[in-house]
Image (cartoon, rainbow, N blue to C red):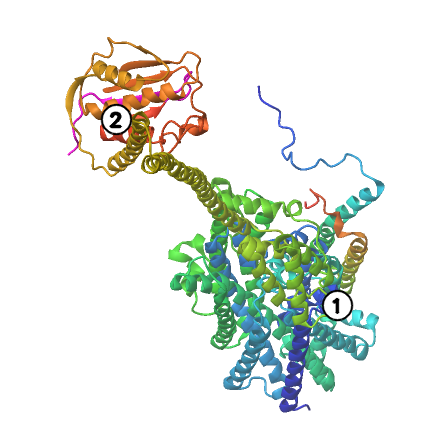
Amino acid sequence: MIEPARDLTPDRPRSPLFLQRQSYRLRRLMDAARFLPVLGLLLWSVPLLWSIGDEETVSSSGALIYIFGVWMALILAAFVVSLRLRLGGDEPGAGG
Amino acid sequence: MITLNALVAVCLTYVVFLFSVAFVAERSALRGQVRWLKAPLVYTLSLSIYCTAWTFYGAVGSAARSGFEYLTIYLGPSIVMVGWWWVLRKLVRIGRSQRITSVADLVSSRYGKSNLLAICVTVLAVIGTTPYIALQLQSVTLSFEVFAQPGVPSPEEGARSYTALWVAFGLAIFTVIFGTRNLDANERHHGVVMAIAVEAVVKLAALMAVGIFVVWGLSGGVAQTLDRIDASELGHWQMNGGRWAGLTLLSAAAFLCLPRMFQVLVVESDDEGHLRTASWAFPLYLMLMSLFVVPIAVVGLDLLPAGSNPDLFVLTVPLATGQEGLAVLSFLGGFSSATSMVIVAAIALSTMVSNHIVMPIFLRLTGNGASVSGDVRHVVLLSRRLSIAGVVTLGYIYYSLSGGGTALATIGLVSFAGVAQVLPAMLGGIFWRGATRVGALAGLIIGFAIWLYTLFLPSIGNGALSDMIMTQGLFGLAWLRPQALFGISGLDPLLHAFLWSIAFNVIAFITFSLASFPSPLERLQGAQFVNVFDHSGGPRSWSGGVAQAEDLMIMAQRILGAPEAQALFEREARRQGARGMLPDPSPDFLETLEKELSGSVGAATAHAMVGQIVGGMSVSVEDLMAVADESAQLMEYSSRLETQSNELSRTARQLREANQKLTRLSVQKDAFLSQISHELRTPMTSIRAFSEILRDTSGLTASEQNKYASIIHDEAIRLTRLLDDLLDLSVLENGQVNLNLRQGLLSDLLDRAAAAANDGGHDLRIRRDVRAEQVMLNTDLDRLSQVFINLIANARKYCDADVPELEIRVSEEKGLLVIDFIDNGSGISAEAQDMIFEKFARVSDRQAGGAGLGLAISRQIMTRLGGHITYLPGRSGAAFRVELPRNFVVPA
């Protein structure tokens, strides 16, 4: 009879299913930290959709404002996340 | 107009200032005042070496030529920094816990300390970085020219080389002084980091000053500037989508892989917490660096005559508007960008070249092997210094050979694409445990080869690849055309090369990883890297000072013992001139402590223990193996010790037994001496007394005289017998006895012995088996019967049974005749058994029958006759066994 594969990492303490409110917040903050670069990449890919060469091209000033706007928003978000994200929050599995 | 001399003076002043900043930082670090050196801000600013002169000057040039493309170079790193939680956090943790010294070291460590991989990465890094250094030299030279001859666009070749040579020389000196000042295991250079932090401020301030001047001074405000941009030839978004995405990814990859970036991001990192600050502060820095690029480019295009070099707008725009001070500041900004890049790149490359190429060769040549003692430190330093000089020289040579033409301008991205080849091996190494050395090697080599063929060689201008290859492909195969592999033409050459090299790199990396099997060390390292957050503890604060010293003290006390450790720490504290008990954990002190500890626990263990406390790093597999080696040696040594001590204790026990025996013998000898003197004295006394009576008393009757004379006679006989016994024994012992061999029947012999022993005195029943005694002997019958008589007489004398009885059994065993004499008395006590055959031994003083020589004589006789006499323990009474060969042959 084949033993069903249960936990492949038995020596790792199993994380609890539900967390205290504080730990929960911390986890979501880590998620936010992971999400930020993806968001940045997405937003900065938007210029790929802008048309080139015809009448309705985006003006340079508009492009500058958009790109730097995204940049500042990202910096602000990273700042907020970094302020609240304690480095103690790297429990097993959080490494991604 | 500012003169060239004034500019050189400004430059030199600035360099002196940098030297002093580095020097002060280095001194503070030595004195342990590292707090301000370890501020997150310093870390963030040190990252700014990403912005080299290529970006300082070139960004504006690029904007003037191709619009917004320059932004991609900053967007990639911004994404990487904002996404620090994914990659950088892990890299820094691994770097700290594994004591990684360079990007080559990271890759080699991950894949089982493979030096081949390290060499590959090093070669790649050197080839990718050398043109980049040349680019920095070029930009400094060009900026000098702007001031030197404003009217003349192209000065003579000699002057250029001259400037570049001096710059290269000065940079090499600075790097050697501050980059190889000490050989720190952690490869941290506080002086250099502080200097580049200062340079970061200078270049940001310079670029922003020019930008502010352009926006508010020349254009009249933000709104007007935006209008002006829209009205210019850059007025519309005209970005190639492929390049936009591709360059963003490329710069993100290069940000992680560039040797100099790895140096400041990971190697010089003191505290993971700094990443938190840098995650938003460095994108902010990048954003500010790029904010004014487009306005400067637009204004430059407007203001300056057509055909002026847009790469130098940052300098020429202020100069053209008469802002010389601003121009000088801007010049210093460019100078800072160039110098800080060259310094850090030279340090990073020299670490790799020295650790992975020079030192292995040196060690192999000198035959030192792995057992290196401390005396190679100066060799390491020398090889570092030579490597730095070599790297800078290579950059200069490249600059001279390329002639400083426009070919260099594209080299920045070419270089990026080259070092990005490390990315698959690096990311695969830290996220995928299945990545193997073979896979990494295959990916690197294939990616590197494609990059070399499709991008690097075509980029370095004429001659590297012939026109025929470029247009018709290698060996005339059209699908091997460098810029149209597989017949897919029309792609941007850079994107084409990046796409194909990375694609094949990744495919080879994954395929070969899947197909190969890693070595044990590789698997261990893989687990350590991928699961670094499980293995290493939370980040320790690098608070320095007291906390560490206390930890060290606690550890040292455990190992050295409390008083010794306290004495050591006090001595060191006094030597450092510190008050109190705890010295600062300076390198000197740590070295001393490590030496002390290694005396107790072995060098590798000591290093690991001190490292654990001071560096906050986990123990690497190599450390563990060294520790295991040491403990194996210790165990072997201790098992040998144990064997020796067992042997010793056995010998000691034997010695103790021998000593006890000797003591008993000596006691007996003493006892016997008094005994023998008593024995001799008693007959002598009576002889003397009765002879005096005979002499002095007159009128003795004849019967009285007869009686006294016979007493004297008897006593004399007793004396004689005693002396005979002693003489007999000494003759037997010295082997001077003459044996008188005759034939005889055992039963006759026993008859005679029983008769002789039994005459007079209480009767002893003797049980015999006469049939068994019908044995013919050929031996000295008289001597043998002497033994029998002695045994029977002893039984008669000492048997304490009510009805004394002696049994004589005769048997044969292993060719020897065995005769047992067993009585029914209480026997001889165990402790006396091994003494009874000694001379003068007597079982008890109960009956002063003889002098205690009988058994000793018997034993000597039996030895002479080729047999033994032994006591048989465990019988009902006293039992003696006589063994002798039936046919005695005198030994030759």
Q: Nearer the viewer, residue B851 or B221?
A: B851
Q: In this view, does B747 lie to the left or right of B798?
A: left
Identify the subunit bearing mark 1.
B
Dot 2 or dot 1: first in sequence order is 1
Q: Of B116 and B732, which appears nearest the observer?
A: B732
Q: How far is disc 2 from disc 1 in space, using C-alphas? A: 112 Å
| Residues in magenta, as a range | B872-892
Q: Where is residue B880 in the image (x, y as percent from the top left)?
A: 34, 21
Please indicate, yes or no, whether residue B150 appears anywhere in the rendered image.
no
- Badge 2 marks a residue whose secondary structure is loop
Name the kind of residue labelled 1 in the image.
Leu
* Residue with the mark numbered 2: B867
At x 75%, y 60%, the residue is B277
> Residue at (55%, 47%) from the top-left corner?
B525
Kind of residue indicated by mark 2:
Gly
Q: Is residue B877 magenta?
A: yes
